[in-house]
Image (spheres, helix red, strand yellow):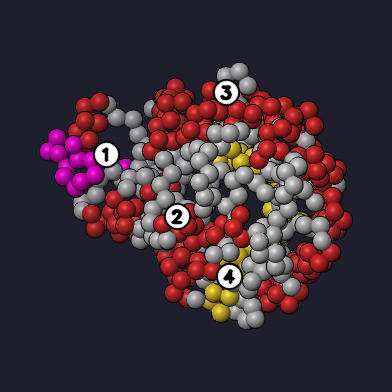
Amino acid sequence: MNALSGAIDVIDEKTAKILERSDDSWFVPIEIDGELRETLTARGYLYRSEFEEGEVLKKIAKDHDEKAHKIPGRFIFIVTYACNLRCSYCFQGEFMRNNRIMTSSMVDKAFDAISEVSERNGGSVPEICLFGGEPLMATRHQKEIVKKILEDCESKHYPVRVITNGVELEYFLDLITRFDVKNLQVTLDGPKEVHDRRRMFSNGKGSFCKIVRGIDLALRNNLRIELHVNVDSDNIRYLPDLADFIVKKGWLETGQFTPYITTVKNFGCGDYRSCITECELLSELYKMLVNKTQLRIFVVPGGYVKLSDGQYSSSPLPGGYGINCIMSLLAHGKIPPPRIKNCGAQINSFAFDPCGYVYTCGQISGRKEFSVGSYYPKLALDERKLIEWRNRSVLTVRECKSCRMSLICGGGCAAAALSKSGNLYCPQCTQVEENLKFGIGLFLDDIKKVFQEIA
């Protein structure tokens, strides 16, 4: 497989052994000549020089950046760092003591900054996201601020989504239904007894029942819900029970509800040691799928599902960097294009916090040293820091230049790299090769059929 050219081919054992001798070097064995050399060159596996291959990658990266500038900017309002829950794995725990809430004038200045930045990037309509801490806390002032943000979004025709723990959905329902909120992201980490051990109030009481009531009311009002399940070694075995609960509630039948699975990410969670890798998640899920077919209601971002007619369609299981290449091959007959950068934080994302600072990613907000400037009392971006973020790619992270998996993962999460090592240009590897091998082993028979049809 060649992530640069998009080629994927089946070769015989003899050719494989020849190619292994030149793996990770520019030595081409003498046996690669004639028709084999022509084929490998045509398919993008061989180049005349390292320079030639580099030029191809640079052109793809340039095209990527030109297209990225046309993508609507994503602007995150971190309404407050305060939160009404004390989740066991929260990466923002140290910032929750900061109970400052955005003011009305801050909201005005944030929208001024959005207009200015959007104009620089071609004037595309930005997308707005409300985040925290917890953006929907049941206080009068916070509700007024959320109302102002939603009113401004409506007047400017900006699409808006809300990432919330879902505890106070009922309190905010009148606002959310009045304005055009694109979707709500809410979290349940398992059935009641499991969720309540992980996502509890400061007094130790569980939040499950309030969240479920909020979801019921939201769906009754035709609001779109993205349910996120944060999975680690402590709750993965309870996913079938949560799936049963979701089915029983009838949420899927509304057509407005999608349940996602994602692994708990360590963005500075102290000594939290229950995190699992994507490969561990997928492996465990497929073991359970043998007897627990209800798990297919869940979506792993980037995944596909095999339909009853043998075709593949985007959505539920499986997913993850690496395995997504195999699933794309089965669904579309080709692998995804090269991933030059990992996410929008390296392209066109900004986050405004209640202290007046600007970040490129909400996951590292609150740590002033990682900010890229301020928006209050006026917009003042640190262009040097901003350029560092925007320039981070597989071409600028040293280890990525020699990694054969870099064009699948895009160098990994920049925010995690900065948070863990203090170095934005440190690679954040995500077991892509393990995921890829897992996907090949899991769907080998289907892959063979694809090539038989091509032949």
Q: Nearer the viewer, mark 2 or mark 4?
A: 2
Please tell me how crowded label 1 is: few (under 14), some (14-19), or many (20+) other residues with Cα within 10 Å: few
Q: Is residue 325 left or right of residue 19?
A: right
**52 to 390, vertically: above or below:** above
Please tell me how crowded label 4 is: few (under 14), some (14-19), or many (20+) other residues with Cα within 10 Å: many
Residue 39: mark: 1
Q: Which element carries disc 2, helix, strand or loop?
A: helix
Q: Which residue is mark 4?
A: 358
What x and y, as percent, mark residue 344? 53, 58
- Pointer 1 or 2: first along the chain: 1
Q: Which residue occupies the foreground of this view, 142 or 271?
A: 271
Q: Which residue is mark 2?
A: 420
Q: Which residue occupies the foreground of this view, 25 or 422?
A: 422
What x and y, as percent, mark residue 433? 38, 38
Residue 288: mark: 3
Spatial CA distance of label 2 from label 3 is 33 Å
Tell me which amino acid carries mark 3.
Answer: Met
Spatial CA distance of label 1 from label 4 is 50 Å
Q: Nearer the viewer, mark 2 or mark 3?
A: 2
**298 to 223, vertically: above or below:** above
Q: Nearer the viewer, mark 1 or mark 4?
A: 4
Spatial CA distance of label 2 from label 4 is 20 Å
Question: Which residue appears at 69% of the width and 29% of the height?
Answer: 243
Tell me which amino acid carries mark 1.
Answer: Thr
Tell me which amino acid carries mark 4.
Answer: Val
